[in-house]
Amino acid sequence: MRNAASFEDCNVLFRELYNQLDRLNSKDLNMEKRRVVNASPSKDSYDYVVRKELFDAFENIPESKATAIATKSSYVIVFSNSGAIKVATQASGPYIFKRKSSSLIVSVSAVSPPTSGDARFNLKHNGVNILVNDIILPSTAASLEVVNSTDFISSPITFEIDDTLVLEVVSTSGVSKITVELYVKEI
């Protein structure tokens, strides 16, 4: 560390310090393998979101919905539920096909894992299961861990216009706030 012997030395030291701070503030910061602690809630559109805001946002999602997110020739049907779910019920409203499609992959995820065993789900196409085996969301030891399970559909199903698809809850094991995505290809 340098010592300032005169007023001019102080100016030089302040200028160097300012330049170092300016370089830090004017470039992208690489926060790899570091975490930000004691962050405040976001205020502006491009602020980072803190974990509490994310969980609060999940609480404000409508109880259940089924939507489609389209890309070029394929799209994703998303079933989501933000509350508690019951066995032998539909976890969300039905999805009604508006274009002829074929199934590819199904994925299920939850904000927190099942607590008392695995949770099981299936998708019903016009009342018939499309998966030979239920898709399983495994229970884990970590209570705040996001869990996910993906399954390829071995025999693709063809969905016609006005066919319905619903998410069936086979077993919940205490899981809530689930999202099930079915990746389909337009044919």
Image (spheres, rainbow, N blue to C red):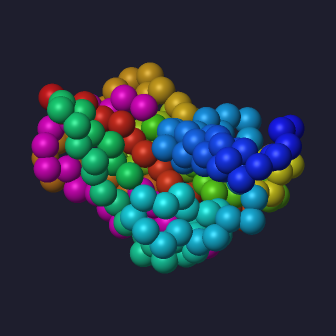
Closer-to-camera residue (60/99): 60
Q: Where is residue 91 in the image (x, y as percent from the top left)?
A: 49, 64
Residue at x 80%, y 57% (from the top left corner): 143
Residue 166 quadrant: bottom left
Residue 170 quadrant: bottom right
Membership of 84 in magenta stretch: yes
Closer-to-camera residue (6/131): 6
Residue at x 67%, y 34% (from the top left corner): 32
Q: Where is residue 1 in the image (x, y as percent from the top left)?
A: 86, 38
Does 24 sit above or below residue 58? above
Closer-to-camera residue (132/26): 26
- The residue lying furthest to the top in this view is 154
Q: Where are the magenta residues, as a range?
A: 79-105
Left or right: 171, with 67 as reference point: right
Q: Where is residue 158 in the image (x, y as percent from the top left)?
A: 24, 33
Membership of 70 in magenta stretch: no
Left or right: 39, with 125 as reference point: right
**Rendered-image quadrant of the C terminus:** top left
Q: Where is residue 39 in the image (x, y as percent from the top left)?
A: 68, 65
Left or right: 74, with 85 as reference point: left
Residue at x 44%, y 22% (from the top left corner): 154
Q: Can residue 156 be seen in this view?
A: yes
